Image: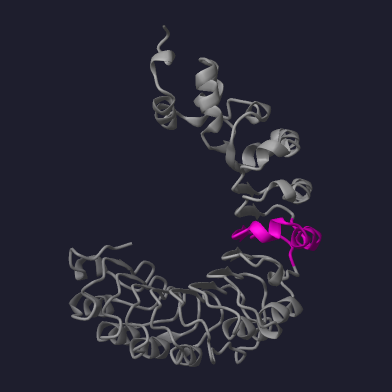
Amino acid sequence: MSTSQLLYPDMIYQILQFVDEQERIVQCSTVCRQWRETCQIIPIHYSIQSKTKCKLFRLIPFRINSINVQPENYLNRIDDLKGLFSHHSKICYLEKIELVIGEFKELILQIISCSDHLRKLAELTACDCGIDDECIEKMQQSKLALSLKTLKLRGNSITNIDLSKFPNLTSLYLGQNKLSLDSIRKNFSEMRLDYKLVYLDVSGNGMSNEGLSMISMSKNLNLSTLKIGFNRAISNSSTDHFYFNGMKSSHLTHLDLENLHLNSDCIQSLCSNPLSNLTELNLARNLIGNEGVRHLSNCNQLKSLHTLLLDYNKIGNEGVKHLAHSQNLSNLKLLFLSQNYINDEGANMLAKSNCLRNIVFLDLSENGHISIREALPPSFSFE
């Protein structure tokens, strides 16, 4: 009697769970019929990399739960991928597809055409893949729009999207696209829908202040994470700033406002909003200065904050003094202050602060200091 016959099916299943997926496909499935059948029911999370050992056609008998395509090798495997998606009986197990950096538009259109067989697909990533409005329109008309919960489409050429077509979407990544003002208005201002979105990234879309206001004040959103950074106003006027008046997402825990040309008045308006649940705030690469730091330090809505990014903001020792004496920021653990105007005097204020005792990481790199390392206690990390 062979060794494989001495093992119960559930024992084989448990053993194969710990075997590398490539080896399971290439080697273990050829041991005997019992092992092959067991291999075929264990979910496969398949990644196409330069060191891939087996051809995609060998995956057909297996239960593939996710596919990840690495950019360095996709050109050699694009035909294999198209062939794989023609086997409808097997792609029905797919829960996740990840395509990054490549001309995948035709493949995406094929995936959309197979949407009737992709009812379990909950996450689709297609970043820097040449996705345009044609793909989005067809996706919205397919059953794929009903199953998706996470959609990552950074770095494409999307100008229009209708979020009402994605009723179960909880996470949407649309950074570095070209969203039009009309699309923003339709999704976040005119329509009155209860989106399930908790994560929204629309950074780097060249958005005007009007578009930013529509999103931040939208009654349709109840987000935990909002990323609208790198949308510096289209106007180059130094007086054209974005003000936060009437933000509606009171459950926000993460807010990314990097590089929005924000000044101290903008920060004052931000602090007037319901931010009591906020744990991470990114204000790097703005113009908030010492006065903006004063507004942050006096904001009693920021008592839950544990990560604060203030890099490159023209902050000097006066601003540091406000931080060092802030009772409202006493829960800070990570503080980023690189590329400002802070010297040893400011570093000493941070080191001796009774309010910032919980800090475990402090970035003061590229400031005007000489001996900041010596000014900090051992409990502080220095970058």
Q: Residue at x 53, y 70 (%)?
A: 198
Q: Residue at x 51, y 89 (%)?
A: 266
Relative to 52, is 74 on the left or the right?
Answer: right
Q: Residue drawn 65% across and 67% down?
A: 167
- Res. 359 image quadrant: bottom left
Depth order, front residue of 357/162: 162
- Residue furthest out toward the right: 134
Q: Is 179 placed left or right of 20 in the picture?
A: right
**Horizontal and vertical percent position of residue 272:** 45, 92
Q: Quadrant of residue 216?
A: bottom right
Hey, which quadrant is residue 232 in on the image?
A: bottom right
Residue 34 within the segment the image draws in magenta: no
Which quadrant: the N terminus? top left
Q: How is the image coloured?
A: one colour
* Span shown in magenta: 131-158
Near-viewer residue (333 or 232): 333
Q: Residue at x 64, y 65 (%)?
A: 174
**Image spot of residue 334 (x, y percent):** 33, 69
Q: Nearer the viewer, residue 85 or 241?
A: 85
Residue 96 coordinates in the image, percent (x, y):
59, 48
Residue 380 is situated, as x and y percent measured from the top left of the image, at 23, 66
Residue 301, placed above or below residue 159: below
Say whether residue 106 is left or right of residue 184.
right
Q: Residue 140 in magenta? A: yes
Q: Is residue 174 visible?
A: yes
Q: Is residue 171 above or below residue 337?
A: above
